[in-house]
Image (tube, rainbow, N blue to C red):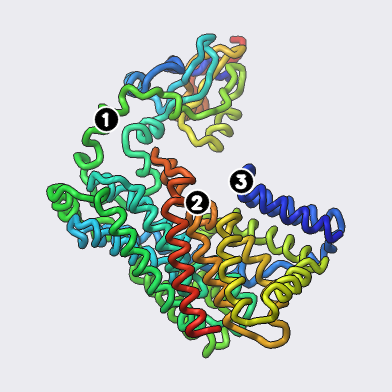
Amino acid sequence: MTQLRRLPLVRASVPETATLGDAALELTRAGVPAIAVLDTLERVRGVFTSEGLLRGWYPPYLAELRHTAFLDDDAMLAERADEVRGEPVRPYVERVEPLDGGDSRVHAAERFLHAKVDALPVVDEGRFLGMLSIGALCAATVEHLAGSQEPQDGS
Amino acid sequence: MEVAAIAIFVGALAVIAFEFVHRTKVALVGAALMVIVGVLSQDEAIEAIDWATLGLLAGMMVIVGLTEPTGVFTYLALRVAQLSRGDPIKLVFLLAGVTGLLSAFLDNLTAILLVVPITLLIADLLRVSAIPLVVVEVLASNIGGTATLIGDPPNIMIGTHRPELGFNDFVVNLAPVAILTLVTVTAVLALLFRRQLRVDPARAAEVGRLDPTRDMRGARNVGRTLAVLLGTIVAFFLHGLLHLEPAVVALGGATVMLLVAADDVESALERVEWSTLFFFLGLFVMVGGLEQQGVIDEVAEWLADVTGGSRVVEGMVILWGAAAGSALVDNIPFTAAMIPVVDSIQGDEFDDALWWSLALGACFGGNATMIAAAANVAATGILERSGQRISFVRFLAVGLPVTVLSLLIATAYLLLFQL
């Protein structure tokens, strides 16, 4: 069994006191669909996702709308970007159950199939190890199926 | 058992009014308690459920749910904003008119869910506060919904309970007074809010340049979907001639809509608001418990004593009492409880005037407070999620006078033409 801690995890996180601007920068820097939001003891409090960034960046009623093809970016973004940059990230944090470093790929696959986020935090004894994205999990699975040299538990 | 039935029902109403727990949970727990403590048997509980109301609601939810992706409702709302050309009086009248019309032919909760989000966008683009516009829409939705059998849940319950009252009867007897009330109330609101809704001409011109058809070009099934929606509305008008119950018309329309406009039935049925249907289900069982224990008959006898058997006084007591009850609790459970009372008051002689009194009281009473109607709760919820909050008192300050004005118009109408 391949343990998740051996997969390529991305160490992407912000403290829960971070601003929306800080979280947006970290999200884009890390290049994963979600980053972890940690408390002072490095425990995962939730994740900040690309969807959370969209919710913060654009007016809140956008999520209630279904038809907006007639809008242009200037109309939607004017003044709002500066207003929200300094806001706390906390309202945009989504609660998720982290994966454990000792979990299997199949368990991670099941979690992704039922989760609303495309990257989940992986922890070891409660401490944050890194973010596992669906892409990284799929890549590891493809490599394994292709019979490539995949690090095995205990090897 | 009678005391237990009253305690369960009044307790449930109190919890619903104060929103401690989701109203669907309250109604289902109340229904379960009625059966568990023996107020009514399992068979009686199932018999108490008004399946026609549930069918009508579910059918309309599917029809509207499959029409919404066409973008036609967004088109309507945006065109209205453009037609106003930044004039606050015109904007209020046009938004109230569209909301009232959608409420009459879809239902007021659906109309609010469709119109309020696009109103928040319009307000943002025009740089005015969205709150006055949303308040206008909520009040217009409850008044507009009064006009038809399918416009407001109290009317749906009344219409499905009394087959003598067809879709056209509602239109003939309630639409004129609803239109008159809507125009009067909108005029008052336009004057009240005109200063808050002053629009910079440059912003109005910018909104005028937006092309609302852009979102409809890619939408599939627009023609077929709208044809089914309009066909269903026509069938409501003709249901008496066709010998079809309103619920059958709604479910028939939903079935045709699923056939012509839904690629995936599962996702189409996700648009059914199951929590609302289960809320009604629980409510019917609780009211069934009150009926079973004779509570409803006692209330009716008490009302007959109070009114001295006078038809005019009965009509007025039902009108103003239903409005007061709806304002304090929620017009859906209150109407559910009042329907058997009106049944009992009229006895063997069917009297439609008492039913119009109940419909006008419950629907207009839905405007008094933020919790009085499902549409109000939904609109304030959308406002809150968008970062704008309207307090209970601020809504009451507008809603209560509007309700009193509406009831005065309804009183005059009933006294002149019905009672």
In this view, A22 is above or below A92:
above
Amino acid type, callout 3: Phe
Q: Which residue is mark 2?
A: B370
> How far apart, in angstroms, are the residues tagged by discs 2 and 3?
11 Å
Image coords of residue B289 (percent x, y): 78, 63
Kindly identify which chain the residue marked by label 3 belongs to: B
Is residue B352 at all visible to an observer of this figure?
Answer: yes
Decide if residue A22 is on the left or right side of residue B304: left
Tag 1 subunit: A
* Residue beneath the point at 17% across and 52% down: B204
Question: Residue at left 63%, top 50%?
Answer: B16
Disc ID at residue B397: none
Residue A101 position in % (x across, y down): 58, 17
* Badge 3: residue crowd in 10 Å (few <14, some 14–19, many ≥20): few
Check disc 2 and report its element: helix, strand or loop: loop
- Work out whether residue B46 can be spotted: no
Residues marked 1 and 2, same chain:
no
The answer to whether B334 is drawn above or below residue B237 in the figure is: above
* Residue at 15%, 54% in the rendered image: B209
State which tag comes first along the sequence, 2 or 3: 3
Q: Nearer the viewer, residue B363 or B250?
A: B363
The foreground one among B193 and B78 is: B193
Q: Which residue is mark 3?
A: B18
Q: Nearer the viewer, mark 1 or mark 2?
A: 2
Number of on-image labels: 3
Q: Which residue, given by chain and number where applicable, does mark 1 sit on?
A: A81
**Quadrant location of residue B344?**
bottom right
Q: Quadrant of the C terminus of chain A?
A: top right
Q: Quadrant of the N terminus of chain A?
A: top right
